[in-house]
Image (spheres, rainbow, N blue to C red):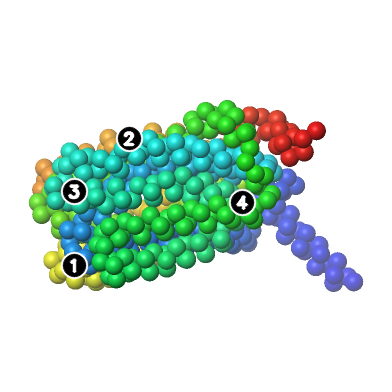
Amino acid sequence: MEETQTLATTLLNQTNELVAEDGDYAPVKSYQVLKKIIWIESVKTWKIAAPIAVNIICLFSVNSVTSIFAGHIGNLELSAVAISLSVIATFAFGFMLGMGSALETLSGQAFGAGEVHMLGVYVQRSCIILFTSCIILSPIYIFTSPILKFLGQEDEIADLAGKFTLLTLPYLFSLAFTFPTQKFLQAQSKVNILTWIGVVALVFQILLLWLFIYVFDWGITGAAIAFDVTNWLIALSQIAYVVGWCKEGWHGFSMLAFKDIWGFVRLSLSSAVMLCLEIWYTMALTILTGHLEDPVIAIDSLSICNYFNGWEFVIFLGINAAVSVRVSNELGMGHPRTAKYSVYVTVSESFMLGILFLVGILIARKYIALVFTTSKVLQEAVASLAYLLAITMVLNSVQPVISGVAVGAGWQTLVAYINVGCYYIFGLPLGYLLGYKANWGVKGLWGGMILGIVLQTLILLFVLYKTDWNKEALQSTERVKRWGGRDIATDEEAVKTEENPI
């Protein structure tokens, strides 16, 4: 009996060391407590991050295998598809992802605050906004060929890329449903279903590409059709799961989705600007590379590096989403210290993972291009860029994670200003000078732009260091009310009235 009481007392003391009365972490006062918090936060973060990372890897691989199949048709086809997916699709993807990230902030904080019933209203608002955005972006898909020619791409590449892009217009509209349902599920940590959908979609895409290109001999037309079908399969699968298996957050269609929608639009635009400035920065590198001598080899080598960079980047996008969920949930619950510790642990672990990727790329630099091509010239060009690729991978291990913190905390506008200065005032002009004026080619373009990312990362790390997390927690509830367009209590009564009309 005495031993049982002693054990109970010990467990209670350990709990009190970790958790304060309000449910937040207590201040760290010993190394043992620090180790426990690191372990707890690592488990919580990776439980969310790992399934999301697998899902995003599969979705990114849908793009990648499309380019791989196109590359085995010919170098021109690889250039056209790479330009389409890395410039036009990336442009649209960035804007749509940004517009959908407002839902990530609001849903995460609303879920943390216990206002789960509002998630269904938010996801409907987001779908309305994103579908409208698709209509606005459609002319870019329709007039891709003249746009690329205006930007200086060779006619042969621009015409073929224009044909492929126009055929992938249905893909754009699938994003209007993919992103909102994805954020809806992430906010509630219902992420395992996303993994299964991603894996099935990737296998399905490979089968369709083989069928359309090698059996039906449809060339890149078949690649485009397979791309559309697979992405709509993803969107419809996520919609089905939300409607059929998420009864707590989904209460059916509601007219509240149209109420005060402009508040939601404003936060969506702030999120879109922040993320677009990051994603379009990479897109600008591809466009500038198209003006160099021998643009086919230059674009192909850079595109291959970008795919490897992308495969690593999407892992950290999973961590980005996880830390965004953790920060938004904890701020919504009024736990500022937990949010802070979660951020510190996640950023540190991500950096160490980035170092491992750097080492791997440097070891395999002479062989990585074999996945995409048998051309010796192209393999040598990729190997020469591998050092810059390795540095970029380390930066990717930190920068997306901090962006996830920004989304979770609602700092989108601040980060947008930082991105403008670091990327477009500093990095892009420097890359242009090194690439064209100093005649360093692709290495100069990429190297200058890497320095822009370094500057941005250092500034964001300083912002994290100076953040008052208690203030952020106090602001989270107000943010849900303000950008949700209605007072939470009013919305709750409205939802109950719709479900149980008098």
Disc nearest the viewer among 4 and 2:
4
Q: Which callout, 1 or 4, points at the residue further toward the start of the chain?
A: 4
Q: Which callout, 3 or 4, points at the residue further toward the start of the chain?
A: 3
Q: Which callout, 3 or 1, points at the residue further toward the start of the chain?
A: 3
* Alpha carbons under labels 1 and 4: distance apart: 47 Å
Q: Is residue 498 above or below residue 211?
A: above
Q: Secondary structure at mark 4?
A: helix
* Alpha carbons under labels 4 and 2: distance apart: 42 Å
Q: Which callout, 1 or 2, points at the residue further toward the start of the chain?
A: 1
Q: Quadrant of residue 307?
A: bottom left
- The circle on residue 421 is 2
**In what quadrant of the picture does the N terminus appear?**
bottom right
Q: Is residue 3 left or right of residue 334?
A: right
**In what quadrant of the picture does the C terminus appear?**
top right
Residue under numbered circle 1: 379
* Alpha carbons under labels 1 and 2: distance apart: 35 Å
Compare residues 58 and 26 and report the one nearer the observer.
58
Q: Quadrant of residue 109?
A: top right
Badge 3: few (under 14), some or many (20 or more) residues near its Cα, within 10 Å?
some
- Give amino acid for label 1: Gln
Q: Secondary structure at mark 3?
A: helix
Q: Is residue 277 above or below residue 374?
A: above
Compare residues 164 and 212 and report the one nearer the observer.
212
| Image position, residue 70 (x, y; %) | 25, 62
- Give amino acid for label 3: Asp
Number of marks in the image?
A: 4
Residue under numbered circle 4: 243
Residue under numbered circle 3: 159
> Is residue 9 among what the camera can see?
yes
> Is residue 112 among what the camera can see?
no
| Image position, residue 484 (x, y; %) | 59, 33
Residue name at image x 40 percent, y 40 percent: 134
